């Protein structure tokens, strides 16, 4: 059939045409599920082939296949974590759950519901998982599966799991308790999700206490909503602030200074915001530029919030200053908007260089499509292969990406894309992916200021670049001549008069 055009979506359509559209929607959904099954089979085949090749190379068993999740994620334009999750699920479909895989391949089961089948049976043995696979997705139950909702599907799998192996279910619950944690991730509209994974009884008790505090505050005339009071109370209790002081968030202002600003006294208007704690244990850096350009709150200790309007960033800084909770730190950038290049003789990146690399990457892993926070400061060209400990040869990576690039067949080298630092990654299959660092704040002025001669001295000659933009030199009595400033190590020949000239060549 002919797909509907723009005009078909605004006017009436025949009943038969609408029915064809609905049929096509269903067929395309089935096709998506079939494509997911094909991707799963390819991912598992790639992993098996890679492990076989690395086994022949004598690589230890625990190190085999480390780079496959990154390859799968890059091919699917997903993060390495997403590639690893898909690979693990695909491995279970292909090798342990043939009926679930067949239901996915034929379009009866969606990819998400097939993933739930793997997740809800992960704690069982291969034998019990195979029994549940047959009883839920087998040929005899295929019609019922097509009509079953997601919640009913999960309930049925849990019921069968408890019937087949109750001890495994109890152990899974105990393991879940040991995995309690707190996480934070970005949310829309400059918000974040602060999530606590805790045992059920503890979570219910904490929620009930916050609810009670909110209702008490509302009863005394507080105009905030119940959810607002609960959120503010949670922040105040965790941070130890007084009631009503949840907005007093300490802020570090990272000032990105251009060379012309530093040497000629331009307006210092480019700032970098870092929401942090008073001890400096992490935060959310970003940037704010003149003319109300938006700030970019990047990944800090855990997660960032993305683009922030300029007025919001300025209000955050102003509030922190009023609360006496603001700190200032300067970072130097060159006229092209790049951070100052620096090197180190150390095997590992020193703290100052690591901070520059995190600022350049804006706290996010440098691997394509990876949104994980930076955990490791890595050499693009390995130090063992002669790579320097420098800003150009450094990058910020998450733990998974740093380990994946060490697998056999992976190579990286620094490059340049439109004047910005970039890294080209070549996988064992020969596929190349290039990642470019985010754009930093631009300098205040991109043209060099005019040369101002000092008293009694001449300016630089045609085509000559002075060593400093400052006016160097001094005026002395005429009978003594003019004393010129000369770089260290440049000696005057005996018997020759000094020349009052500052036109030495700039070292290249």
Image (cartoon, rainbow, N blue to C red):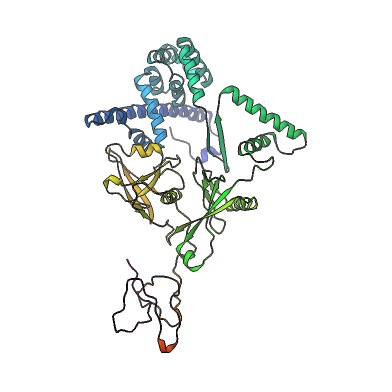
Residue 365 in the image: state x and y as whole percent.
42, 43
* In the image, residue 502 above or below residue 422: below
Q: Is residue 244 visible?
A: yes
Could you tell whether 326 is left or right of 114 in the image? right
Residue 143 in the image: state x and y as whole percent.
46, 15
Q: Nearer the viewer, residue 15 or 267?
A: 267
Residue 486 in the image: state x and y as whole percent.
37, 75
Q: Quadrant of the C terminus?
A: bottom left
User: Residue shown at 45%/29% (left/top)?
Assistant: 24
Magenta stretch: includes residue 489: yes
Q: Nearer the viewer, residue 413 or 325?
A: 325
Residue 286 in the image: state x and y as whole percent.
51, 50
Q: Nearer the viewer, residue 285 or 84?
A: 285
Q: Nearer the viewer, residue 475 or 413?
A: 475
User: Residue shown at 50%/30% (left/top)?
Assistant: 17
* In the image, residue 269 above or below residue 150: below
Q: Which residue is situated farthest in the bottom direction here?
A: 479
Q: Which residue is situated farthest in the right direction here?
A: 220
**Prevailing secondary structure class for the magenta stretch in the rendered image:** loop
Q: Is residue 34 visible?
A: no
Residues shaded magenta: 485-508
User: Residue shown at 51%/21% (left/top)?
Assistant: 150
């Amino acid at each position: 059939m002919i797909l509907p055009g723009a005009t078909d979506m605004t006017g009436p359509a025949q009943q038969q045409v609408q029915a064809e559209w609905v049929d096509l929607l269903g067929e395309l959904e089935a096709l998506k599920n079939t494509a997911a099954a094909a991707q799963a089979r390819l991912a598992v085949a790639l992993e098996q082939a890679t492990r076989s090749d690395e086994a022949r190379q004598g690589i230890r068993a625990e190190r085999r296949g480390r780079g496959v999740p990154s390859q799968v994620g890059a091919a699917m334009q997903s993060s390495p974590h997403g590639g690893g999750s898909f690979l693990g699920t695909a491995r279970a479909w292909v090798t342990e759950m043939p009926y679930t895989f067949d239901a996915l391949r034929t379009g009866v089961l969606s990819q998400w519901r097939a993933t739930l089948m793997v997740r809800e049976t992960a704690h069982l043995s291969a034998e019990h998982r195979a029994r549940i696979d047959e009883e839920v997705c087998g040929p005899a139950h295929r019609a019922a599966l097509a009509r079953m909702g997601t919640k009913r599907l999960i309930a049925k799998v849990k019921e069968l799991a408890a019937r087949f192996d109750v001890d495994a279910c109890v152990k899974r619950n105990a393991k879940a308790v040991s995995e309690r944690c707190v996480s934070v991730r970005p949310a829309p509209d400059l918000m974040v999700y602060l999530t606590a994974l805790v045992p059920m009884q503890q979570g219910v008790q904490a929620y009930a206490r916050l609810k009670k505090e909110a209702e008490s505050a509302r009863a005394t005339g507080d105009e905030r909503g119940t959810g607002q009071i609960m959120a503010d109370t949670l922040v105040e209790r965790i941070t130890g602030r007084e009631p009503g002081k949840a907005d007093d968030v300490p802020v570090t202002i990272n000032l990105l200074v251009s060379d012309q600003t530093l040497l000629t006294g331009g307006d210092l208007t480019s700032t970098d915001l870092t929401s942090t704690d008073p001890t400096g244990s992490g935060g959310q850096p970003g940037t704010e530029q003149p003319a109300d350009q938006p700030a970019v709150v990047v990944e800090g200790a855990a997660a960032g919030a993305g683009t922030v309007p300029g007025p919001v960033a300025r209000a955050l800084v102003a509030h922190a200053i009023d609360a006496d909770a603001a700190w200032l730190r300067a970072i130097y950038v060159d006229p092209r908007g790049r951070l100052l290049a620096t090197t180190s003789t150390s095997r590992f990146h020193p703290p100052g260089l690591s901070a520059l690399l995190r600022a350049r990457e804006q706290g996010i892993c440098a691997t394509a499509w990876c949104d994980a926070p930076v955990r490791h400061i890595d050499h693009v060209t390995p130090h063992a292969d002669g790579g320097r400990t420098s800003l150009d040869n450094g990058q910020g990576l998450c733990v998974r990406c740093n380990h994946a690039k060490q697998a056999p067949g992976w190579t990286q080298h620094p490059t340049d894309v439109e004047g910005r630092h970039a890294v080209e990654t070549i996988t064992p299959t020969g596929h190349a992916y290039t990642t470019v660092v985010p754009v930093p704040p631009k300098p205040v002025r991109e043209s060099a200021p005019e040369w101002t001669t000092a008293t009694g001295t001449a300016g630089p000659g045609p085509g000559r670049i002075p060593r400093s933009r400052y006016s160097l030199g001094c005026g002395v009595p005429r009978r003594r001549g003019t004393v010129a400033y000369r770089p260290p190590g440049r000696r005057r020949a005996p018997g020759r008069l000094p020349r009052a000239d500052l036109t030495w060549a700039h070292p290249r």
